[in-house]
């Protein structure tokens, strides 16, 4: 492990990063302890209370209520868990698949490398998010399908990133030496390459978490992601849109949650990048 | 020349591959495309008849090769929901989207580069942090939400700008735009139809602003970083030592040197704008490819989806190609790969 | 509505100042010409799935009723006469209800200038019967005779209410022979926005998915010419966008104001809100093939769990009434004596217990593009949970929902929510038959329910309705009582049609028999 990980002080290096770290910690706490924090957990889960529909923000409901009379703050709190989980799941699966393929491509070289890289090039020939949109349409709207669709278009970024690093490492003398000394290939890969690609991987993951939240929210907004009665931020923006001129608070606050989460991840992604390696960026 | 051919042929391969991916996805649909075509109240016999007409009864590989051949010959199929030729739908709607992208990228470059340069100039000071916050907010902004907020505030509450559409409906009757290039605002300017042009620009402000947020953020961050890098380079230091005025150094030398990476980022951000238009056009009811794309997606209009995907992939490739060309022009050392 | 608090003049000044500042341009206001006075601007969600009047079976009816004419128009319930003459001026039937004679209007012409005559009527209806999506409405028709140019005689194989059929929204338009010949040669003839109608308007421009322009047909037979010679229609699927267009003055009238916004128009003195009965009805199909839903007691228990009041309030935003079975109020053979379920949790629980059901988990599907369903379906889940039945709700596109339900019924959803309406104003032939009559292959009977008594009642009623409407009604009512006790479906609510009308104009009232249509010839400026 890189020794620079031992100190996390860079996460609080200036006001902006401090703000981002605190926001993120809040979201994580809310995601874990939501049911205990929410003013009305029952409504957060989706139980309607028709008689209170469309109450504006105020003392009784800090952020107002939605059309089913549910406390909006509770709904947003319950939306934190799926938002963070889907981001984690997409990035984790994409990183695992992408890393595995990238390692194989980078280390084996030859036709295997060619095939894998051509494949990922194909997936990258779609403008960002387009492939996910198309995939989720044909798979059918829903949270799980949105997850699959996002993974489909995300893995090649990791393959590309890891392959470059793996190539560099694979060409280094110590790999050749250890191969010559009879250490089996697999162990070489795991020990040396994986260790060396950890840093760029972590930087990429941090930057992607925010992007995935944004992407999942976008899918939900046009009706291709999570479906009612799920508490999903993007879906809530879409639902609030129908009443935006009269009940402005629903879309405004749900979208604000997405914005803040993405903002926090982006700021921290920047901080990580500056800290570890200013050279790395997705281009 | 050979490089050009190589790039073209590899681009063609990529497009064929991309179409294969979309086609495969389209065939896993658990829905009935024939039904989308005739509506829910048709009889089973109607649906079966249509399935044969659309060729949906044939094996999938055959369907794919047929599709590929037809696409190559300019037959992109017919939209299931509008019944129009997909290619015609796309060419009819493309100008509106391209104008939107043009203005968005214009806003992004003007504001992004200016603010980025200013941030570099005031490095470490209050202005720098403020600009940093604005730019990072720009890249974190969900376009659909930003669009709604602008609409709510500037169209709904203040009434300064129209909330939706490309022109007022009256323009069509009172000041019809004569077609020259097909780009409505450009055409109205060329033909001296200024009342249509101002109306179009008035409608353009909010959507273009919404769409530009991401590129703006990206550009201002890139501009700042490049300016700082260039300013620290030797020849700038030398010019400073020779006593060239601060302002001339700043704008002439530094900006010129920072230009190539800015071009790259502009190209990169156009890729994001392509899908960005989906959401912006949806919010602003813009009669372009983006709103057509969203409508096709939510109604599983697969010929339209395939056409739009292909177009987007072509747009993406062309943008990258142009960026490389400009790069090579601006900085001969880069050359073409 | 915050917007309406601005007076128009102050708003325009705002716009002008803002634009001048922003663009450095002068004023923005477009000089209004003489044309503007005859231009009526509309926003609607109505998509055009086809311009072919014979294939038409969907929302394009919004335009079609202005472009084409049937033999008769059916009037809303409250009217003195059942029908208004359209291309036929008089008609009668033989005593046995098997021969119908229509006299055609003199002087009616198609938009291509050719006269509307008996031959054109025969050709239109025969071709509709042969190929149309709604062609089944002519099922009783055997042959058409044309003894003279202005007389058409329909010979039926069994008695049927041909006046009702001839006034259908779908499949009953009379079309110019030239257009019929053209479409026979080129199936895409209509696609660019051509028409072959005789109505007060003709299509002058069509931009797929974005706009339709209708212009008045100068030689239309009616004495009173339309007040607006140009109708500009923006296709705006999104209700909130349409609302914004109307309140900001971009369009004169928006037909698809979201139900959730209607409240704010009630207090706005520029608009009035008109509420009518509509043929739209929300039903849930229980999957009667699967245990324990194959037990009527369980279906009854679930029906007693539903909070109908809340569903009406949320789904219809108050503009709805709890349904009495699958026949919407205001449409034959509706019967106000058919019983309804109400929320009785204790009873629901005891019925469930008596059926020995525990730990039931149901899968509910609904059409995600239907915003009312998206609003109220979560309440069904809540209701089931309150009697210990858990539910998994799935919103998918109607296409996918329907395809999945037909593919493998035994392993499909447990409850399928659908919005349904009759093709023409007979919910016996349509709703009662289509939704719950058994069939070998499921089509719209997605409860997969089979009940021989019910089937016989419906079959007999349909044959009887041509000659003896009251007798048929009795059979239908018996059948509807079976639907109540056997509960193969969950009968949710009848939706009302809510129109938000600008007071500046007089707009013809909604006609339940043409639920998707607006009639622009009658639009006038209010004095």
Image (tube, rainbow, N blue to C red):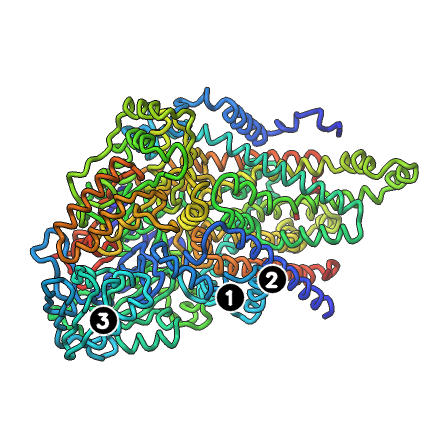
Between residue C84 and residue C295, name the one nearer to us.
C295
Q: Residue at x 78, y 38 (%)?
A: A193
Does residue A62 appear to the left or right of B112 in the view shown?
left
Between residue B158 and residue C334, name the one nearer to us.
C334
State the image quarter where residue B260 is shown: bottom right
Numbered-mark total: 3
Q: Residue at x 14, y 76 (%)?
A: C150
Residue C66 in view here = no
Residue A47 higher or lower than C182, as above or below: above
Question: Are dots 1 and 2 in contact, CB under 8 Å?
Answer: no
Which mark is in front, 1 or 2? 1
> Which quadrant of the rendered structure holds the N terminus of chain A?
top right
Residue C434 higher or lower than C125, as above or below: above
Mark 1 element type:
loop
State the image quarter where residue C147 is shown: bottom left
Of the numbered discs 1 and 2, the one sitting upstream in the chain is 1
- State the mark number for residue B76: 1
Does residue A258 appear to the left or right of C246 in the view shown?
right
Q: Position of residue C84 (x, y in %)?
A: 12, 62
Q: Which residue is mark 3?
A: C143
Q: Position of residue B103 (x, y in %)?
A: 48, 57
What is the crowding at mark 1: few (fewer than 14 residues within 10 Å), some, or many (at least 20)? Answer: many
Which mark is in front, 2 or 3? 3
Q: Residue at x 22, y 58 (%)?
A: C518
State the image quarter where residue B65 is shown: bottom right
Q: CA distance from mark 3 to mark 1?
A: 43 Å
Q: Position of residue A37 (x, y in %)?
A: 45, 21
Question: Are dots 3 and 1 in contact, CB under 8 Å?
Answer: no
- State the mark number for residue B318: 2
Are labels 1 and 2 on one chain? yes
């Amino acid at each position: 492990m890189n020794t620079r990980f031992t100190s996390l002080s860079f996460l609080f290096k200036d006001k902006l990063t401090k703000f981002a770290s605190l926001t993120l910690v809040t979201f994580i706490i809310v995601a874990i302890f939501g049911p205990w924090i929410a003013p009305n957990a029952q409504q957060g889960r989706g139980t309607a209370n028709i008689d209170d529909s469309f109450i504006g923000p105020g003392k009784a409901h800090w952020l107002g209520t939605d059309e089913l009379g549910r406390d909006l703050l509770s709904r947003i709190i319950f939306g934190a868990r799926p938002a963070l989980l889907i981001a984690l799941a997409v990035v984790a699966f994409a990183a695992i698949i992408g890393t595995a393929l990238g390692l194989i491509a980078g280390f084996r070289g030859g036709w295997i490398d060619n095939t894998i890289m051509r494949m990922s090039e194909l997936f990258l020939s779609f403008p960002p998010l387009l492939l996910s949109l198309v995939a989720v349409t044909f798979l059918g709207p829903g949270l799980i399908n949105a997850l699959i669709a996002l993974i489909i278009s995300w893995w090649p970024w990791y393959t590309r990133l890891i392959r470059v690093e793996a190539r560099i490492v694979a060409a280094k003398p110590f790999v050749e030496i250890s191969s010559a000394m009879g250490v089996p290939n697999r162990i070489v890969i795991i020990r040396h390459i994986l260790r060396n690609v950890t840093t760029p991987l972590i930087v990429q993951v941090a930057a992607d978490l925010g992007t995935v939240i944004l992407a999942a929210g976008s899918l939900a907004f046009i009706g291709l992601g999570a479906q009612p009665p799920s508490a999903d931020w993007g879906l809530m923006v879409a639902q609030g849109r129908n009443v935006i001129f009269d009940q402005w608070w629903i879309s405004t606050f749900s979208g604000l949650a997405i914005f803040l989460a993405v903002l926090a991840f982006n700021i921290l992604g920047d901080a990580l990048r500056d800290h570890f390696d200013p050279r790395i960026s997705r281009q | 020349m050979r490089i050009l051919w190589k790039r073209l042929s590899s681009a063609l391969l990529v497009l064929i591959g991309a179409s294969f991916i979309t086609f495969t996805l389209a065939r896993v649909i658990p829905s009935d495309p024939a039904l989308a075509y005739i509506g829910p109240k048709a009889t089973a016999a109607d649906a079966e008849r249509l399935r044969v007409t659309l060729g949906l009864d044939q094996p999938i590989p055959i369907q794919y090769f047929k599709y590929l051949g037809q696409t190559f010959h300019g037959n992109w199929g017919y939209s299931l929901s509008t019944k129009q030729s997909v290619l015609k739908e796309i060419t009819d709607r493309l100008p509106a989207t391209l104008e939107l992208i043009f203005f968005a990228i214009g806003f992004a470059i003007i504001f992004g580069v200016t603010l980025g340069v200013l941030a570099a100039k005031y490095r470490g000071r209050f202005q720098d942090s403020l600009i940093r916050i604005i730019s990072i907010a720009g890249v974190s902004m969900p376009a659909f939400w930003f669009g709604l907020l602008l609409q709510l505030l500037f169209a709904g509450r203040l009434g300064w700008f129209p909330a939706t559409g490309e022109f007022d409906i009256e323009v069509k009757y009172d000041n019809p735009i004569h077609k020259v290039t097909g780009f409505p605002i450009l055409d109205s300017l060329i033909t001296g139809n200024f009342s249509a042009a101002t109306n179009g620009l008035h409608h353009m402000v909010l959507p273009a602003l919404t769409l530009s947020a991401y590129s703006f953020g990206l550009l201002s961050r890139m501009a700042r970083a490049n300016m700082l890098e260039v300013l620290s380079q030797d020849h700038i230091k030398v010019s400073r030592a020779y006593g060239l005025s601060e302002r001339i150094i700043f704008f002439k030398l530094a900006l010129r040197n920072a230009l190539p990476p800015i071009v790259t980022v502009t190209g990169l951000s156009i890729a994001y704008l392509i899908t960005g238009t989906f959401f912006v056009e949806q919010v602003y009811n813009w009669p372009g490819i983006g709103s057509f794309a969203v409508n096709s997606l939510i109604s599983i209009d697969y010929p339209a989806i395939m056409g739009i995907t292909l177009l987007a992939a072509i747009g993406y490739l062309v943008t990258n190609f142009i960026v490389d060309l400009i790069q090579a022009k601006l900085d001969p050392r880069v050359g073409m790969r | 509505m915050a917007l309406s608090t601005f007076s128009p003049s102050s708003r325009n000044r705002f716009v002008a100042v803002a634009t001048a500042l922003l663009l450095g341009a002068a004023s923005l206001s477009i000089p209004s010409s003489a044309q503007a006075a005859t231009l009526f601007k509309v926003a609607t969600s109505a998509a055009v799935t086809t311009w072919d009047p014979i294939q038409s079976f969907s929302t394009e009816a919004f335009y079609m009723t202005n472009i084409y004419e049937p033999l008769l128009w059916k009037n809303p319930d409250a009217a003195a006469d059942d029908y208004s003459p359209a291309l036929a001026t008089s008609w009668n039937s033989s005593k046995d209800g098997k021969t119908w004679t229509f006299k055609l209007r003199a002087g009616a012409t198609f938009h291509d200038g050719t006269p509307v005559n008996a031959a054109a009527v025969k050709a239109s209806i025969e071709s509709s019967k042969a190929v149309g999506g709604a062609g089944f409405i002519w099922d009783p028709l055997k042959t058409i005779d044309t003894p003279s140019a202005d007389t058409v005689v329909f010979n039926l194989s069994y008695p049927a209410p041909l006046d009702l059929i001839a006034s259908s929204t779908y499949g009953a338009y009379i079309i110019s022979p030239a257009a019929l010949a053209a479409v026979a040669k080129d199936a895409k003839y209509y696609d660019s926005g051509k028409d072959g109608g005789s109505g007060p308007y003709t299509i002058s421009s069509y931009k797929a998915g974005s706009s339709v322009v209708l212009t008045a047909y100068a030689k239309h037979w009616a004495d009173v010419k339309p007040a607006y010679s140009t109708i500009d229609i923006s296709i705006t699927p999104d209700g909130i966008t349409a609302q914004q267009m109307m309140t900001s003055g971009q369009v004169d009238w928006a037909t698809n104001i979201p139900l959730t916004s209607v409240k704010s128009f009630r207090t706005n003195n520029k608009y009035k809100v008109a509420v009518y009965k509509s043929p739209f009805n929300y039903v849930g199909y229980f999957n009667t093939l699967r245990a324990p839903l194959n037990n009527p007691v369980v279906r009854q228990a679930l029906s007693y769990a539903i909070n109908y009041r809340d569903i009406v309030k949320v789904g219809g935003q108050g503009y709805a009434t709890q349904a009495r079975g699958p026949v919407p109020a205001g449409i034959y053979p509706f019967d106000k004596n058919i019983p309804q379920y109400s929320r009785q949790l204790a009873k629901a629980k005891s019925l469930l217990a008596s059926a020995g059901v525990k730990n039931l988990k149901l899968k509910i599907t609904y059409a995600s593009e239907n915003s009312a369903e998206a609003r109220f379906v979560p309440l069904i889940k809540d209701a089931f949970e309150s009697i210990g039945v858990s539910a998994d709700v799935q919103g998918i596109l109607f296409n996918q929902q329907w395809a999945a339900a037909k593919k493998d019924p035994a392993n499909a959803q447990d409850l399928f929510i659908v919005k349904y309406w009759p093709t023409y104003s007979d919910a016996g032939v349509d709703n009662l038959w289509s939704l719950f009559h058994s069939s070998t292959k499921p089509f719209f009977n997605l409860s997969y329910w089979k009940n021989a008594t019910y089937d016989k009642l419906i079959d007999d009623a349909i044959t009887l309705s041509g000659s003896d409407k009251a007798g048929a009604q009795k059979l239908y009512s018996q059948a509807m009582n079976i639907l109540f006790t056997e509960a193969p479906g969950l009968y949710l609510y009848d939706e009302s049609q809510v129109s938000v009308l600008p007071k500046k104009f007089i707009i013809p009232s909604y006609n339940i028999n043409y639920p998707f249509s607006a009639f622009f010839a009658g639009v006038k400026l209010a004095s």
